[in-house]
Amino acid sequence: MKRILVVEDEPKLRRVLVDFLETEGYEVVVATDGEAALDLACQRKPDVIILDVMLPKVNGFDVCRSLRERGSRTPILLITAKGEETDKVLGLELGADDYITKPFGLKELNARVRARLRTATPRPERAVEQYSLGSMVIDFKQHCVLRDGRPLPLSALEAGLLKYFIEHRGEVVSRNDLLDKVWGYDSFPSTRTIDTHVLNLRKKLEDRPDAPRWLITVHGVGYKFTG
Ligand code: CA
């Protein structure tokens, strides 16, 4: 069952939305202000967030921005007020995926929610499955590095880190990026934890982990993958 977080402070509209979505077979989680929305988005991991712009405490735009900054990729459908063209533009700029303008029909809402659920499923054609690095092959399906024909298993975190490095090869990647994108926005490992995992990766990839060729430290910032 897909879970939807409804963030709406207006009781009447909230009731209508919840009833409708539950009838459509969704599990519905409700927040009545922006602060609660951020907490619930983190704790309940909804598949889609329906987010009103005008909210107490933290407004919808800031909720949107905050979630994206923490690395959340949950689709967000913004509810904007009638005639507020700037709201739509700003919302999309801040990371919302779509918007719907009040007043809206429930059929339209449902169509948009379904569209968001469809796009939220991972696109397999973009996933890296194998990557050649020097004489090694990194096999993400088997979760291992093939080194001289010998498979060295990768932990899920190491595989996640490596994927992120490959996707950003040649770029300087900060520890904050790694925290957000690999660990996820609801866990808070220390930077030392990150360094330890990078060190473990080096032991698997590098001929000389103390003088790395592929995973280079950029002092004061983070790392750079040169493969
Ligand atoms: Ca409102």
Image (cartoon, rainbow, N blue to C red):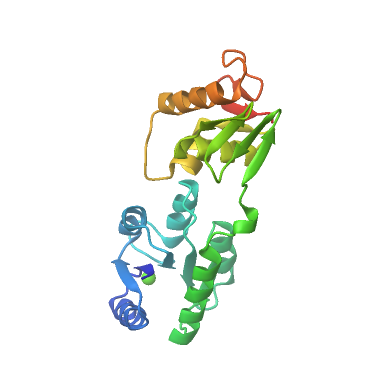
User: Which residue sits at x=32%, y=76%?
Assistant: 14
Please state if 58 lies on the left or on the right of 146 as rendered: left
Please state if 194 lies on the left or on the right of 211 as rendered: left
Picture layout, residue 156 above or below residue 210: below
Q: How far across and down, in percent of the image, does residue 17 sit? A: 35, 79
Instruction: Give the tally of numbered discs.
Output: 0
Q: How far across and down, in percent of the image, does residue 19 sit? A: 30, 82
**Is 138 or 79 nearer to us in this picture?**
138
Where residue 225 sits, quadrant-wise, is: top right
**Is 23 or 15 nearer to us in this picture?**
23
Q: Quadrant of ligand 1?
A: bottom left
Picture layout, residue 113 above or below residue 32: below
Please state if 137 lies on the left or on the right of 76 as rendered: right
User: Which residue sits at x=55%, y=23%?
Assistant: 202
**Is 132 or 49 nearer to us in this picture?**
132
Q: How far across and down, in percent of the image, does residue 171 sit? A: 66, 34
- Residue 177 shows in the view: no
Quadrant of image for the C terminus: top right
User: Which residue sits at x=59%, y=27%?
Assistant: 223
- Residue 122 shows in the view: yes
The residue most toward the front is 149
Q: How far across and down, in percent of the image, does residue 100 sit? A: 51, 76
Quadrant of image for the N terminus: bottom left
Where residue 214 sits, quadrant-wise, is: top right
Where residue 32 sits, quadrant-wise, is: bottom left
Picture layout, residue 184 above or below residue 22: above
